[in-house]
């Protein structure tokens, strides 16, 4: 600290920190959150801290950032701003070696700050993912895919434990990992859409194991900044693997479920099981589920006028449009005679509204040919967000009321 105070006056430091406030207001997401950290850095630089305590103080600032949920890069930009502006305020005739000392000192600041941030992040992430793993184990998910996901959560926790204890242990690489072997063996048995997901999984899985090795190398070299960024990337890969496993598991589950022979949509007998599974995932991720009831307008008139064969053609066409308008991870059911239900995981009611409007407009523009007749069809749609505190029956009643409102207010519309 004496280095900065020796060459930079308190007046100049005040100017630098005044400019820093404007910089943070412009560059960060929430200035008020960072204001205490700026004050901490100001006190840190102005205080006479013993040399052997400097790194410890900076580590404490890094830990504070994690506890206050501050973004690492934005916090680090404070140190970078101080480095650039402090060096800019050095006397013009200063020996170049002194300027290089300043560069080394701010690099040292960055390293100590990052070390504290990393240590606190490790403890927090370890607890979060340990609880996540425990939650999955309590659910007794019997899918082989979830077993492999749990296995990789265990690898991730082992890595965090290694960093906590500063002892690196040998974790399995991609080639010998059970999941990698399973993916390669099963790939040839899967359908095209499933193979696409497996290809993604293979890439994420390979990256997962590579990242573990890179993290070990970066940490052993005391490159804490790189370790933090790689750990974040690894954490994303854990979640991406979990997401792809969930989608693949849904597709494989759907194969086993009963389907309506006319429309090839799921039957309502599968609904409770699917909702239960999706709610388990939502409780962990904090995501949302939306429901959509779709009813064909004036369907009785079609049956009475053109016959039941025409009605069946209409039902099949509507089912095709619904399936082509939703994601692979969504679920479409033939709920009743001319009524369809769509379950949209990880979808808010506003997002579901967009999907519903897309379906409604597609159907409205569709002309169905039957014998010499051209049939124009419309649908009414009710949309609501699933309330996990209510029963399935109560949630269905809510979305059914929305459908009734759409019917009563003129049909061919969406009510949310």
Image (cartoon, rainbow, N blue to C red):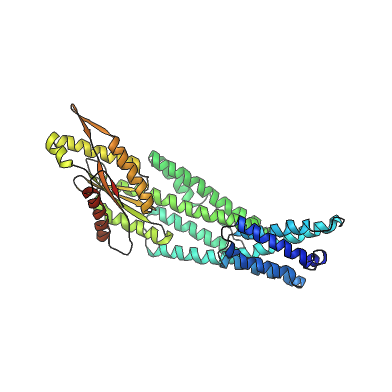
Locate the N terminus and report the quarter of the image it occupies: bottom right
* Residue 173 in sight in this render: no
Residue positioned 37% across, 63% down in the render: 139
Query: Residue 358 versus residue 160: which sits nearer the camera?
Result: 358
Residue 121 drawn at (x, y percent):
57, 64
The residue furthest left is 304
Q: Is residue 218 above or below residue 375?
A: below
Residue 300 drawn at (x, y percent):
15, 42
Residue positioned 15% across, 39% down in the render: 301
Query: Residue 391 versus residue 210: which sits nearer the camera?
Result: 391
Residue positioned 62% across, 64% down in the render: 117
Query: Residue 186 versus residue 252: which sits nearer the camera?
Result: 252
In the picture, measured across the screen, residue 90 lies left or right of residue 128, that is: right
The residue furthest top is 372
- How many labels were placed on the picture? 0
Q: Is residue 100 above or below residue 185?
A: below
In the picture, measured across the screen, residue 256 lies left or right of residue 112, that is: left
| Residue 385 location, quadrant | bottom left
* Residue 8 in sight in this render: yes
Residue 120 drawn at (x, y percent):
59, 67
Residue 407 drawn at (x, y percent):
22, 48
Residue positioned 60% across, 68% down in the render: 64
In the picture, measured across the screen, residue 157 lies left or right of residue 372, that is: right
């Amino acid at each position: 600290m004496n280095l900065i105070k020796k060459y930079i006056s308190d007046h100049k430091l005040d100017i630098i920190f005044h400019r820093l406030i404007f910089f943070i207001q412009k560059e960060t997401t929430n200035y008020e959150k960072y204001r205490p950290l700026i004050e901490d850095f100001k006190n840190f630089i102005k205080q006479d801290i013993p040399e052997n305590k400097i790194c410890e103080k900076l580590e404490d600032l890094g830990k504070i950032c994690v506890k206050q949920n501050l973004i690492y890069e934005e916090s680090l930009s404070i140190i970078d701003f101080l480095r650039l502006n402090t060096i800019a305020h050095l006397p013009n005739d200063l020996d170049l070696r002194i300027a290089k000392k300043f560069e080394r000192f701010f690099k040292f600041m960055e390293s100590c700050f990052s070390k504290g941030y990393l240590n606190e992040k490790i403890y927090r992430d370890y607890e979060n993912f340990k609880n996540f793993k425990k939650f999955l184990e309590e659910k007794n998910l019997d899918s082989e895919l979830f077993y492999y996901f749990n296995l990789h959560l265990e690898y991730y926790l082992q890595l965090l434990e290694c960093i906590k204890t500063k002892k690196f242990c040998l974790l399995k690489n991609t080639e010998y990992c059970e999941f990698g072997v399973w993916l390669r063996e099963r790939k040839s048995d899967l359908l095209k859409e499933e193979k696409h997901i497996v290809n993604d999984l293979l890439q994420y899985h390979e990256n997962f194991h590579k990242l573990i090795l890179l993290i070990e190398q970066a940490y052993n070299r005391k490159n804490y900044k790189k370790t933090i960024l790689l750990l974040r990337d690894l954490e994303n890969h854990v979640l991406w693997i979990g997401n792809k496993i969930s989608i693949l598991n849904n597709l494989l589950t759907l194969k086993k479920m009963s389907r309506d022979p006319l429309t090839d949509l799921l039957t309502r007998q599968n609904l409770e099981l699917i909702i239960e599974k999706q709610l388990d995932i939502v409780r962990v991720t904090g995501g949302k589920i939306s429901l959509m009831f779709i009813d064909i307008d004036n369907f009785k008139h079609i049956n009475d006028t053109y016959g039941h064969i025409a009605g069946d053609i209409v039902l099949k066409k509507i089912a095709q449009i619904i399936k082509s308008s939703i994601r692979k991870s969504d679920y479409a059911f033939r709920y009743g005679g001319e009524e369809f239900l769509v379950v949209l995981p990880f979808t808010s009611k506003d997002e579901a509204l967009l999907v519903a409007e897309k379906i409604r407009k597609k159907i409205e523009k569709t002309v169905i040919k039957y014998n010499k007749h051209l049939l124009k069809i419309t649908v009414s749609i009710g949309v609501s967000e699933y309330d996990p505190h209510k029963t399935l029956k109560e949630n269905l009643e809510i979305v059914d009321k929305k459908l009734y409102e759409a019917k009563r207010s003129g049909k061919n519309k969406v009510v949310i």
